[in-house]
Image (cartoon, rainbow, N blue to C red):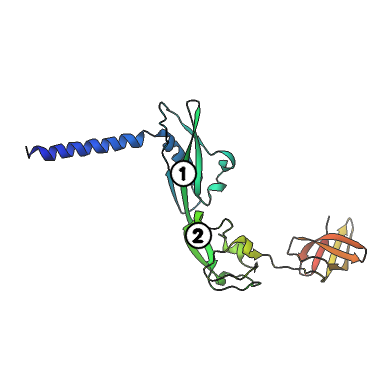
Amino acid sequence: MQSLRPTLLRWLCGLSFSALAMHAQADPLADAALALLQARTHGLAEEVHITVQPATVTAGDCPAPMAFLPGPAQDASPLARGGRVTVGVRCAGQVRYLQAQVSVIGHYWVAAVDIDAGTTVTRALLREERGDLSRLPHQAVRDADAAAGRQSTRPLRAGTVLQAQHLRAIPLVTRRQQVVMEADGAGFKITRDVVALDDGAHGDLVRVQLDPRTQLNAEVIGPGRVHAAR
């Protein structure tokens, strides 16, 4: 009798593993959703983890499920940060919706030291971190070059996740500053001194005053220089 126990245990274990394999293969909806998310997140980051919750209702006969991302998530951009995602699956004339959790592991930037408001940000003031992007603020900065050369809008403590709202372009023109305005056309170019009525960085449109009664819009093209808006 004892000699039968190892054989019986091996048979039961084999039966259990077979049942698990059959269960894993019996959810074509989840498999289709997973395949879609893997394709859409390919190349978004160094590491992506995807977990699809199995369908609450069995799919039945569904030889060719078609997964899709509903609504604004149809392109890959909403998946770039990860988080909870709804995936639709068309099957036998019906649509089922599954929930998935996408964890995108990538790089982002934090303040390496305390940064005062109005400081020009450089790479030396930043430190690169790595983690789950879905846990970060929505406007977290992931490109240090996009932050370098900009000005902090508020004090930042060391370790603060850098966000786009923490930064602004350095003004090249300030309110009430006398600036040079250029205007050109077919065969002519003129310059004249005007007074800026707004702060503006490169490419911004600001109001300028030609005289007490005349104002117009001009584009900031350099330090203390604007071009009459076309």
Where residue 217 sits, quadrant-wise, is bottom right
Q: Is residue 49 above or below residue 5?
A: below
Query: Which of the two residues, 53 or 201, is positioned nearer the viewer here?
Result: 53
Of marks 2 and 1, the one in the foreground: 1
Label 2 vs 1, first from the N-terminus: 1
Task: Using the numbered discs, state the Cα–Cα distance from disc 2 to disc 1 in whole angstroms.
Answer: 22 Å
Q: Which residue is drawn at 55% across and 38% down?
A: 70
Please state the horizontal and vertical placement of residue 138, each as a whole percent of the image.
57, 55
Q: In this view, does 24 lie to the left or right of 105?
A: left
Q: Which amino acid does label 2 sit on?
A: His
- The residue shown at (21%, 39%) is 13
Kind of element beneath mark 1? strand
Per the image, the residue denoted by label 2 is 107
- Quadrant in the picture for the N terminus: top left
Residue 100's label in the rendered image is: 1
Residue 92: x and y in percent read 47, 26
Q: Is residue 167 left or right of residue 37?
A: right
Q: Which class describes the residues within 10 Å of circle 1: few (<14), some (14-19), or many (20+)?
A: many
Q: Quadrant of residue 6?
A: top left
Residue drawn at x 75%, y 60% is 204
- Amino acid type for the residue under numbered disc 1: Ala
* Residue 57 position within the rendered picture, expressed as x and y whole percent measured from the top left: 42, 32
Q: Which mark is residue 14?
A: none
Disc 2 element? strand
x, y percentage for residue 225? 80, 67
The picture quadrant where one finds residue 74 is top right
